[in-house]
Image (spheres, rainbow, N blue to C red):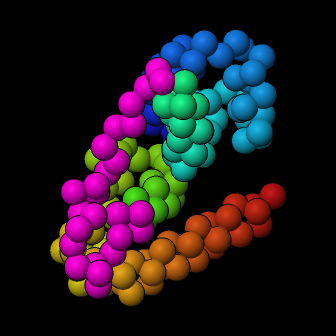
Amino acid sequence: MISFSQIKQIHTLKAILGLDDEIYKEMLMSFGVASCKDLTFTEAQILLEILSEKAIAAGKWQKPDSKFSGLEKRSDSRASPAQLRKIEAMWRDLCFDKSYADAKKTLRKFIQNHFKVSDIRFIDKATASKIIHVIDKIQCEKIKKSLKAY
């Protein structure tokens, strides 16, 4: 589920770009929704990237520091910032009913219990790939269960 902060960012970028409602609605329809409130956390991130790239290209916006950007120059054996962001985004989609803080806490607990790593920043590349694979399987199972309910 989209966060309140993402909603604010989307509307801020919409205003900065001067998008009219028709173009904005078309962008939302490309995600299969009529309102940004219906986007998943990951879809909202994608829309924010699209809008911010347009705003940066128009010279109306500066790219903020991305999460985990301070970890760019660490050992090659460690998970990349992109992998860490992907893990967090996938977990956030999985825990859509929880607040950001609760989702982060449950992710940390999941990683500790299943992979014996105390914090996401300490994950190596191989473990990051395993975590992504496991979260993907959990999401698939969740979708299968919800489809069986119908």
Which residue is outermost to the left? 118
Residue 98 in picture, x, y percent from top left = 40, 47
- Magenta-drawn segment: 59-84
Q: Residue at x 71, y 32 (%)?
A: 28
Image quarter in which the C terminus is found: bottom right
Q: Residue at x 39, y 31 (%)?
A: 62
Q: Is residue 2 left or right of residue 25?
A: left
Q: Is residue 9 magenta?
A: no
**Dominant SS in magenta:** loop
Relative to 113, say whether 145 is above or below.
above
* The quadrant where residue 124 appears: bottom left
Q: Is residue 120 visible?
A: yes
Q: How many marks?
A: 0
Relative to 36, say whether 124 is above or below.
below
Residue 122 in picture, x, y percent from top left = 21, 75
Relative to 123, say whether 54 is above or below.
above
Q: Residue at x 54, y 31 (%)?
A: 57
Relative to 43, say whether 138 is above or below.
below
Q: Is residue 145 visible?
A: no
Of residue 126 and residue 75, the one placed in the foreground of this image is 75
Q: Residue at x 29, y 47 (%)?
A: 101
Residue 3 in picture, x, y percent from top left = 45, 36
* The quadrant where residue 40 appears: top right
Q: Is residue 118 left or right of residue 26?
A: left
Q: Is residue 73 magenta?
A: yes
* The quadrant where residue 114 appears: bottom left
Of residue 149 and residue 93, the one placed in the foreground of this image is 93
Q: Is residue 109 left or right of residue 147?
A: left
Residue 84 in picture, x, y percent from top left = 36, 65
